[in-house]
Amino acid sequence: MSVVQVKGKDVELDEDGFLVNPEDWNDDMVAYFASQEDVTELTENHWKVINYLRDYFKKFGAAPMVRKVCKDTGFSMQEIYELFPSGPAKGACKLAGLPKPTGCV
Amino acid sequence: MDDAKTPLLDELEKGDWPSFVTEIKRAAKKNKSAQGLLEQLETSYREKIGHWKHGGIVGVKGYGGGVVGRYSDLPDKYPDVKEFHTVRVCQPAGFFYTTKKLRQLADVWDKYGSGLYNMHGSTGDIILLGTTTANLQPCVDELSEVGFDLGGSGGCLRSLACCVGQARCEKACIDSMDIIRDLTQKYQAEIHRPAWAYKFKIKVSGCPNDCAAASARSDLAVIGVWRDSIRIDNKEVRKMVDGGYDIINRVVRKCPSEALNYDLVKKELTVSAEDCVHCMNCVNMMPDAIAIGRERGATLLIGGKATVVKGSMIGWILVPFIKMEAPYTEFKELFEKITEWWAENGKNRERIGELIDRLGYANFLDAIGLKPLPQMVRAPRSNPYIFWKKEEVN
């Protein structure tokens, strides 16, 4: 657990850098997460994925499977990794403010 | 209590066998996190509870897997193992290394991690045990410079594994090492960028001895086999028998399908090839006299796995015989059809064997375009039935 200051506001993150309280999510947090996850510039395509993930989560209470993300957004896996170099789970879900996906052993 | 003392772990150093405790103690002499591991583990033994949190999402740039996050749930007490992530490194086919390569690997791991390894994990990867989040990227970058890449974790094609194959074994019916190398090169995206609901494993064994444990530990097992007949050199048979070898009890009576016959007068061993089930006993027992056949290829098995959604399953026959010659186009097409059907229909954490159980083998065969064959019957001695489709019965 750690606390970071983003635009003067204290925000609590877990050890993997995901939001502890989902209500802390806002545009400033997206920009902060982008800087942590090698996203240099937030484009329209990034927002398309972020908004899709948030909508899906609101509707179903869980993150979609990667295959579904690709199908529904129209981006290939390659394109998803180009947008989010640390991948859909560690990158895209973090920027979208979703709870941490369960670890996969 | 003095944390440096580990009376319970010390018990595990007694006896004749090598001890993991001894190895952790050796690493602890030059590495603080290994010392932390030792102390936390002693606490776990004392309290009879594990002190690792489950999972964690860490990683390196461009990869969706290959690193498994590990965090201590006693970070204040054991700050040196607060972050203790596991790095999976893809092994070369058949586990062949030069000492130089191993030293290069060890140098990188001494610099960035605990200095502790599993050689190898059950998937086959070299497992590097314990590093921090900050050290991950530089560690993987330097591993890459000395020629190592990450293996798989999560819902991906896991690092492919095989036996030592034709590099080391006269029984290998197929070039298991080349197959693994070729598939690893081809399916880099599937290995490093998890796109499925769960793991998928491919293992290749050169012969039915199955040294890679493919039948039990891989979703798609490739097992080398011959389809003509074992080759018997009766001159060598006689030499063994004349030397006092009990061929009747050790070989002929052990043949599970009674395919072998030994003529006591002529001192001649013969085989009924169509009865042979390729159990390997005679080939293993009389290596100078009995050899694998000439017409070689592989049998493919589907559905092997360890527990999670359902209990352990052993693979059963999908393709009785396939040639398995480079560039393995037929195999690759089949693999892609299998994973496509599984990705489309599988639930979270459902392996291919479990999905086939749920939706039926007939549906699976339809989807991948294979015709049902008698060899595919999973348990022929207990369940000889097949389900006909509606249009096949009046």
Image (tube, rainbow, N blue to C red):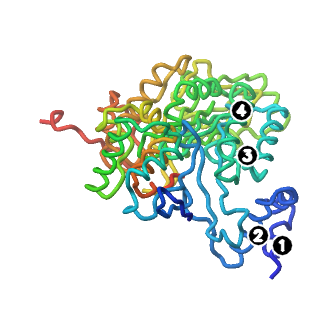
The front one of B348 and B19 is: B348
Seen in the picture, residue A43 relative to B297 is either above or below; the reply is below
* N-terminal label among 4 and 2: 2
Instruction: Kindly state the secondary structure of the residue where label 2 is placed.
Output: helix
Q: Are the residues flagged by discs 2 and 1 in contact, CB closer than 8 Å? A: yes
Q: Residues within 10 Å of mark 3 (few under 14, many from 20)?
A: few
Judged by depth in the image, the label closer to the viewer, 4 or 2, is 2
Instruction: Kindly state the secondary structure of the residue where label 1 is placed.
Output: loop
Rendered image: mark on residue B119: 3
**3D distance between C-alphas at marks 4 and 1:** 69 Å
Q: Can you identify the residue that label 4 sits on? A: B264
Q: Can you identify the residue that label 1 sits on? A: B4
Q: Amino acid at mark 2?
A: Glu
Q: Is residue B213 visible?
A: yes
Judged by depth in the image, the label closer to the viewer, 3 or 1, is 1
Name the chain letter of the residue that bears numbered label 2.
Answer: B
- Position in image of residue B295 (x %, y %): 57, 18
Q: Are the residues flagged by discs 4 and 2 in contact, CB closer than 8 Å? A: no
Q: In the picture, residue B53 is in which quadrant?
A: bottom right
* N-terminal label among 2 and 1: 1
**3D distance between C-alphas at marks 3 and 1:** 27 Å
